[in-house]
Image: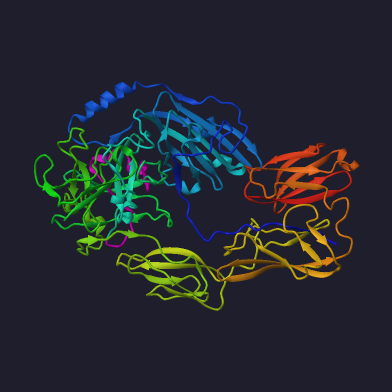
Amino acid sequence: MRPILLLTLFLASLNFAKAQVKTNFNNAEVITAKGKFDKNYLTKSPHTIPAKDIKALLERESLENKSGEPKPFKIAEAVKVDIDVVKEAAWVEEVGFAHGKYTIVASGAKSISANFDRFKLPRGSELYVYSANGEMITGPVTENENNENNFWGTWVYKGEALTVDFKTPIESKSEIKLHISSIAYGYKELYVNNFGESAACNINVLCIQGNGWENERNSVALILDANSIALCTGALINNTCNFNTLNFLTANHCFDGNPANWKFTFQAWSSTCNPSQNANGVTLNGSTLRARNAASDFCLVELNQMPPANSNITFAGWNRNPAAALNTVGIHHPAGDVMKIAIDANPPVAVAWFTGATNHWRAHFQQGTVQPGSSGSPLFDQNHRIIGQLHGDQNNQGNYCTQQIGEYGRFDVSWVGGGTNDTRLSNWLDPNNTGALTTDTRGNEITGPALVCTTANYTFDGQVTWSSSNPNGLNINSTTGAATRVNKFNGQVTITATINSGCGGVNVDRTIWVGKPSGVITNPSGVPAVEANIGNWVVLWATSTPGATTSSLNWWTNNAAALNLNVGYGNCSVECLQAGYNFIYVTSSNACGTNLVRQIPISVTSGGCQNPPCNPMFVSPNPSSSYFEVSLDLTREEYTKGYDVKLYDSNQMNLVYQTTSTEPIIRIETLSLKKGMYILQMTTYKQVITDRVLIE
């Protein structure tokens, strides 16, 4: 007979998410000196920034703030450096990748962050930045963060140390650029009491008071300025073309440094009302100044990066009507804390900022408050539309919970601004001069099922025209979004919602699966998998079946009396009970049905498995995530005289590991290997034995 080895199938997800950079503020994984990639780096001294006089820094800031004019919430002092991380890092090269790690210590700092003025990651690279022991970690950062300004900034990490830890393909190592021009030396406690240190009367946006404001909170972001030393708040804002431009509104007094180097973190809220929990937000890098004006204290920038389509990030609506709202809500990040909400049940009052015209709205909150760090945050009316951005409180002396007042530059005043395109909002938020007084908050999400068996309905927040990338497989009504599967089609389809607003069509895409899973199994290279004969084994190498939603493949035989099928990995996994010609079937399923993936003919002869075992080389664990061990039957003479072991990629083109041994067990580390199938080859003076290993 031919014994059979059957490998588990790894299923493709139905969610087609775009890359995004996130920071985990409460990482449970302890990162040692071996770094994120667990490599044996040579010890190398960190770059050390001497300790600063924190008391003196706080006193200087206090003097600067005595002018009375609000300033961004300062958290750090910028320190110019000249650090070529690529040159200074400790390096380890193995199995196709070069790994680098470098640590920077700002002695005595309460927080630390870094700005890269030369930043480029080759394709296939991954980079992580983390605090001591990995308590806070950002990544993976990939080539998707490359930009024309060659700038990238980290977020702010607790403590005095950060580590840059990265890997890149060896063949493109010369292309990587990681140069740090400044370090932000933090002199304030930013991460206390689970997160920030805002006033006690502030209310987390996920508390009951925030119910109904889900769309608006998804438009708000915490801003870290160009030098990573100050924090403000702002909001992504809609226009009359329905978000064809990434306009972002904040305060003019937050304009500090080059906005091309600003960082924006969305969705940085506590997942619980009380107590506050650390937040993992979505960070976007870079923007371009569009307009600003001091009179109503507004600043409009355009983000350089599109929010991921699966992120739920929204574009807030606005109201430029000069009439006062009935009531208001502010959503903001006081003192850089997790997102908060403040509520005023009464109409705002039109006031002047110190002297002059009534160019501000004053809200007197009954619930919650605002404070430094909230600057630039949106004030919403009862219809959930922005009517202003926070300037501050002319008379507040730091009594935020006893004087719960916020004064916001009026949106209707900012609309006309100083009368030029670079001092007003109208040119940017109504580019076709429609004269609209309002817009509504809009998302960029197509809602509807990820899997279509017969029919489905798709919706979008607004009037759109629908289309399908394959109308012969999935036909979608251009007006209603009603979709119908046709021709018994099985496969992937992209549906598109086109927003026609007179500003040019804006497309929002979503990729879904139609019908039963694919009947084609693919290996890691995307090539259809094949049945391979290895000695006395018949092996089906499979890593994915697109469209499958079951947790594993279904394996069965047409003649259970002939084959006792034991699916798994091991020597002689099929017991032969009866001679004859039989089949093993492999199927894959989802809610639409089952597809035959593979039909394997098996010619069974009497006698069962050979003895000694069919394959003297045993690999475990297989699949592997971090390592595998090769165990050998060294009772045979040819193995005791030594053997060579080689590990190739799935196409047997690239040798990724090689060793010579006489030991009965060898261990091969796999953390640095790409996911996929590999060919393991053992050579003795008598024979060559081949097996395969799946790295997941």
Indicate left or right for 347 with 128 as reference: left
Q: Quadrant of the N terminus?
A: bottom right
Indicate left or right for 467 with 43 as reference: left
Place of residue 528 in the rendered image (x, y in percent of width and height, measured from the top left): 67, 63
Place of residue 330 in the rendered image (x, y in percent of width and height, measured from the top left): 24, 48
Place of residue 333 in the rendered image (x, y in percent of width and height, measured from the top left): 30, 42
In the image, residue 294 lies in the stretch drawn in magenta: no
Nearer the observer, 39 or 633 = 633
Place of residue 50 in the rendered image (x, y in percent of width and height, measured from the top left): 42, 21
Q: Residue at x 52, y 78 (%)?
A: 486
Q: Residue at x 50, y 46 (%)?
A: 142
Indicate left or right for 218 with 594 as reference: left
The answer to whether one can see residue 28 in this image is yes
The magenta region covers 240-268
All told, the count of numbered labels is: 0
In the image, residue 245 lies in the stretch drawn in magenta: yes
Check the image and report above or below for 502 versus 6.
below
Identify the image's colour scheme: rainbow, by chain, secondary structure or one colour: rainbow
Indicate left or right for 41 with 301 as reference: right
Q: Residue furthest bottom?
A: 487
Check the image and report above or below for 398 versus 412.
above
The answer to whether one can see residue 146 in this image is no
Quadrant hosting residue 73? top left
Nearer the observer, 203 or 127 = 203
